[in-house]
Amino acid sequence: MAVVDPPQDPELPQDARIDSLEERIERAQRQEALRTKRAQPDPNYRIGQLVLSHLVGAPLGGGLLGWGLDSLLGTSPWFFLALLFLGFAVGVRNVLRISKTPTGSEPGARS
């Protein structure tokens, strides 16, 4: 059998323990919100990482692909050099495309 608390009379003053508990809960919630607050990422930092990845990744990918083709076909170093420079050109083109993107929009998104 469950014990049912009698309803509180609205004319009686509220228990001081309840007020104290509510204050402690609010204080704990504020402290938790400050503790778990995340810093907003800097969009310029993210764009810088994107630019760096294009300037490093495109020539590296082209060079690896060219090296693989050279080793398979025995044409060393022609495919390596051609695809390395092609990768560099693609990386620079992507950086120029990113630099023309208006601030506040997604650099990789096309309109």
Image (cartoon, grey):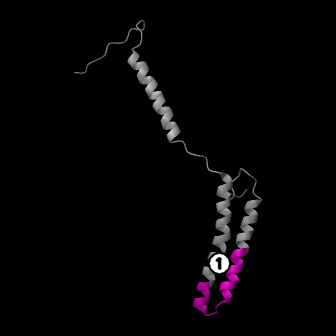
Q: Is residue 74 magenta?
A: yes
> Where is residue 45, by image quadrant?
bottom right
Res. 108 visible in picture: no
Q: Nearer the viewer, residue 1 or 51?
A: 51
Give the magenta part as a residue range: 67-88
Res. 100 visible in picture: yes
Of the 4 image quadrants, the one containing the C terminus is bottom right
Q: Residue furthest bottom?
A: 74
Q: Quick check: 56 left or right of 10?
A: right
The residue that appears at 76% across and 65% down in the rendered structure is 96
Q: Which residue is tagged 1?
A: 62
> Where is residue 3, by image quadrant?
top left
Q: Quick check: 14 left or right of 83?
A: left
What percent of the width, then of the height, locates residue 66? 63, 83
> Which SS type dominates the magenta stretch?
helix
Q: Amino acid at mark 1?
A: Gly
Q: Residue furthest left?
A: 1
The residue that appears at 57% across and 90% down in the rendered structure is 72
Q: Nearer the viewer, residue 76 or 13?
A: 13
What percent of the width, then of the height, locates residue 40? 61, 46
Against 58, is 108 above or below?
above
Q: Quick check: 105 left or right of 7?
A: right
The residue that appears at 73% across and 74% down in the rendered structure is 89
